[in-house]
Structure formats: C-alpha cells, structure tokens
Amino acid sequence: MTGVEAGRALCRLLADPARPYRAMWERRGVAYRGRDLNQAAVAKVVAAYLVDRGVLSEFEEGDWPRARRDWVRSRLSGALLTHLDLEVFMDAFAFDVGERDRLRHILESDSTPMFVPGEIRLEGLPDRSTYAVDRTRDEHVLGADGLPAYHRTTQTVRALADDVTACLYLFDADAVTVEVSSGGTADAPRQVSEGIWAVVLTLDTPLRAGESCDLTYVTTFDYREAPAPVLRRAALPHEVELEMAVSFEPTRLPAAVHLSTWATVTDPQPVSSVLVDLDERHRVSARWTAVRAGLVGFSWTW
C-alpha cells in the first residue's frame, strides 16, 4: 500500500507555521538540522492523544515515541500510511474538516484496494449501497484449546433506500455456520472472492429509507486447523461505530495482545500494533468511531 502523496500533504500541513498544528509539536521539540518537522515531537503529540483515548496507559506515553519511531517515520513518509493511521494523526492534531477531506481524498486516490487480489463477486446479492451499518459489536470467546468457541455480533442496519430486505455479512473463514437470533434469518455461506465468503442476512421486516433495525447473529467456526490469532473487521466508508471484545480462557492465556490495523485482507501481519493488557476477566475490548478504510481489530500470540 502506498500513500506517498498523502504523507507529503500531511507533513506540509504539520510544518506550516500559519496553521496551529506546528505550534502543537514545537512545544514538545523544535525542528532541527534544517528539517521542516521534528518527528519525535510529532510522535509525542500522537502519544498524548492515544493516552486520552485510552489506547495507551500514562506510564507508556514517555516510551511510545522512541519505541514507535519507525512507525511514525514510515507513516509520515507515506510508505505505510493507511486510512486508519491518517485518522490518528488528524485526530491528534484536531485537523479541520476541509483538511481532513482533502487528505482522505489524496490517500484514496493513491491506495491499494482493501480486497486484493481480484474483486468481490456480488452479482445477485443484496446491494450494499442501499443500506448502512451504523453500529457493530463483536463478542469473541476463545476456548481452552485456543480455538474460537463463541462469536456473537450485534448490528444496527439503516436503510438508504426503500424496500431494503437483506444485508451482507462478509468474512475470511471458509468453515462457518451463521444463525440469526433476532432480526432476521441467514442463508448458507458462499465464496465471493479469493479467501472471502458471504452470508445473506434477510431482515424480518423490510426497511424504508431512514428506518433502522437491529440484527443479532452467532457465527460458529469449524476449523480443521488453528486459524490465525486475530479478530478483525473491515472499516466502512461512512461514519460507523465498531466495538470488539475478545475473551480468553484462564487456562489458556495469550503471551501478548495487540490492538492492530491491516491495510488489506491479504496482509499476513498488521501494519500497526499497540500492546494492550487483559482486564480482570481475561478480556480486551476496543471501540472505534472514526475509521475510513482497511481493517481494525486484535492480534495475539500464545
């Protein structure tokens, strides 16, 4: 994934003395050696923002700029800049709406599609442009064998047109069954692209434009071998609230859990990760309200 032009545009805004963003990082360290930016100072502003959002604890704030120096450098250069990373910088520096839209447009025109290689084949399936998923909550439970034991999803679907009767559930596992407990019914999974499957969720009651309904469904996995230790969901191009919670069996706790982002579904490794701690219930959770593209979620190691 490349976002060189977006990275350059981001740096120009951060370095512009006529804008308030430069003063924000200069309070933490001035530019030096003829450079327009002090990337370490920029990283300190981002770290403070992550503490405010609850992604980092206060004791991690001081170490984060040094530990993530390569992460910051690669994002500001645009070499590995994703939409999710861009949102973090724009939120940390409180960019105005016009600048946000311009940067998003630059990155969208310079980015690799999320689903590669190939295209998703959705002929004859519900038109995703006729509805929006405003809220999604995933509850993922891992058993003593380290395999998914339970996965429950709750979504709020809002119609953008009249007579919306169904929506699509896309995922990257081939051996699953989906049962809807409230709001509709599910059909059998079908493959729609390399490594991507879809289930049609038919609503109990058709929606007119502007109407919403809640869907709750449980996904049961039948893995023949252990899957990748991740839980992730694709971000959508409209404003959306995503929430995830992953619970671990006390007898099989992970060595580490990271809050992660991926640029595409074919990425074997996250493009960014932040270490998070389990709570007293052996659980991690996160909530996103400003995601534009790519995937967000958790990754862990045993």
Image (cartoon, helix red, strand yellow):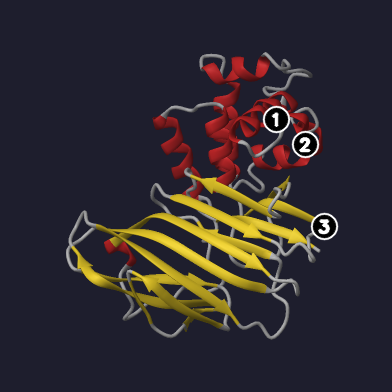
Dot 3: few (<14), some (14–19), or many (≥20) neighbours within 10 Å? Answer: few
Q: Amino acid at mark 3?
A: Ala
Q: Residue at x 51, y 17 (%)?
A: 19
Where 248 falls versus 39 (above or below)? below
List x then y, in percent, for residue 286: 58, 48
List x then y, in percent, for residue 266: 62, 68
What secondary structure is found at the residue carrying circle 1? Answer: helix
Query: Mark 1 highlights which residue?
Result: 43
For the residues labelled 1 and 2, the Cα–Cα distance comes to: 8 Å
Query: Mark 3 highlights which residue?
Result: 255
For the residues labelled 1 and 3, the Cα–Cα distance comes to: 27 Å
Instruction: Report the disc number at residue 116.
Output: none
The quadrant the N terminus occupies is bottom right
For the residues labelled 3 and 2, the Cα–Cα distance comes to: 24 Å
Q: Nearer the viewer, mark 3 or mark 2?
A: 3
Question: Dots 1 and 2: beta carbons under 8 Å?
Answer: yes
What secondary structure is found at the residue carrying circle 2? Answer: helix
Instruction: Report the disc number at residue 69.
Output: 2
Q: Quadrant of residue 36?
A: top right
What secondary structure is found at the residue carrying circle 3? Answer: loop
Dot 2: few (<14), some (14–19), or many (≥20) neighbours within 10 Å? Answer: few
Q: Is residue 202 visible?
A: yes
